[in-house]
Image (cartoon, rainbow, N blue to C red):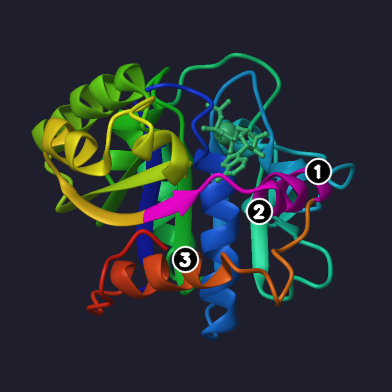
Amino acid sequence: MGMISMITSGKDGVGKTTVSILAADSMETIGKRVLVIELDTGLRSLDVMSGAYGSTVYDIFDVLSGRCSPEQAIIHAPTPRKEIYVLAAPYKNERVQGEQFVKLVTALGEQFDHVIIDAANHAGALVAASAVSMNAIVVATPDPLSVRDARITADRLRDLSVPNIRLLINRVVPTRIRMGLIPNLDYCIDNVGVRLIGVVPEMDEIALAAAAGRPLPRKSGCRHVFDNIVQRIYGNEVPLAVE
Ligand SMILES: Nc1ncnc2c1ncn2[C@@H]1O[C@H](COP(=O)(O)OP(=O)(O)OP(=O)(O)O)[C@@H](O)[C@H]1O
Ligand SMILES: [Mg+2]
């Protein structure tokens, strides 16, 4: 059985899908076969960020409602990705049926080394993903509103008994922290109240890789940030620093 992890947030648009696909890339480099499921309703971006745009015919709700098989809906992300597969969110707005989702992901967990659920915080997605995930990563930016919503989300995940809940702070600009324009990382960690799993800087390379649907370039200065986050997901101690 592979590992199942969810990546979620309080506020929308803080980088869940970006982190999901770039973490999948780091898992691939350590030999994992990874499936990323975008569990959102009415919106999708994983198809673009994984490079699979235009290849998706079916979505997660087609599978859950029996309109197609998982094999028909799961797309292989194109080269240079080799062992990454995606299951897209639908364009229409539907509510996630928790029981069917748990059954589906449990079965898919037999076929992949890691299933990452990119879970929106609405329409039943958080509850459904929580029911099947061993790890939850709550993504927040250092914006006080994002931090407050991350706290509420972390509390919900605790109520939903997700075993391992961690915080990822994304889009960090150290100069803004030094100038006192945004709260520092201790403020974020203390206010969300869960252990930190990583700090991802605001970088053009990340936005460009996401928009182009490609992994970060090999020489990119921030690849190791995602490699270290993945090591921590697997329980390995990697010192935390603002990387
Ligand atoms: N560390 C980063 N540096 C620069 N740009 C980033 C970073 N993280 C995310 N972005 C950009 O922020 C935007 C939102 O990211 P993304 O779509 O991953 O967020 P999301 O939480 O999945 O959004 P939604 O709630 O709509 O699903 C994207 O344009 C992405 O390229
Ligand atoms: Mg998203």
Q: In the rendered image of this protein, does residue 2 appear above or below residue 11?
A: below
Q: In the rendered image of this protein, does residue 223 appear above or below residue 101?
A: below
Which element type, helix, strand or loop, lies under badge 1? Answer: loop
Q: Which residue is mark 3?
A: 225
Which quadrant would the C terminus be assigned to in this image? bottom left
Which disc is residue 56 wearing?
Answer: 1
Say left or right for 9 vs 60: left
Which element type, helix, strand or loop, lies under badge 3? Answer: helix
Q: Which residue is mark 2?
A: 86
Residue 236 can be seen, yes or no:
yes
Residue shown at the point (66%, 51%) measured from the top left:
206
Q: Which residues are magenta?
A: 199-212
Q: In the rendered image of this protein, does residue 15 appear above or below residue 223?
A: above
Q: Nearer the viewer, mark 3 or mark 1?
A: 3
- Examine the image and state in which quarter residue 48 appears: top right
Asked whether the beta carbons under mark 3 and mark 1 sit within 8 Å of each other, the answer is: no
Amino acid identity at mark 1:
Thr
Residue shown at the point (49%, 61%) measured from the top left:
108
Going from the N terminus, do you reach mark 3 or mark 1 first?
Answer: 1
Which quadrant would the N terminus be assigned to in this image? bottom left
Q: Is residue 57 magenta?
A: no
Residue 85 image point, x, y percent: 66, 61
Q: Nearer the viewer, residue 87 or 190?
A: 190
Going from the N terminus, do you reach mark 3 or mark 2 first?
Answer: 2
Q: Nearer the viewer, residue 100 or 223?
A: 223
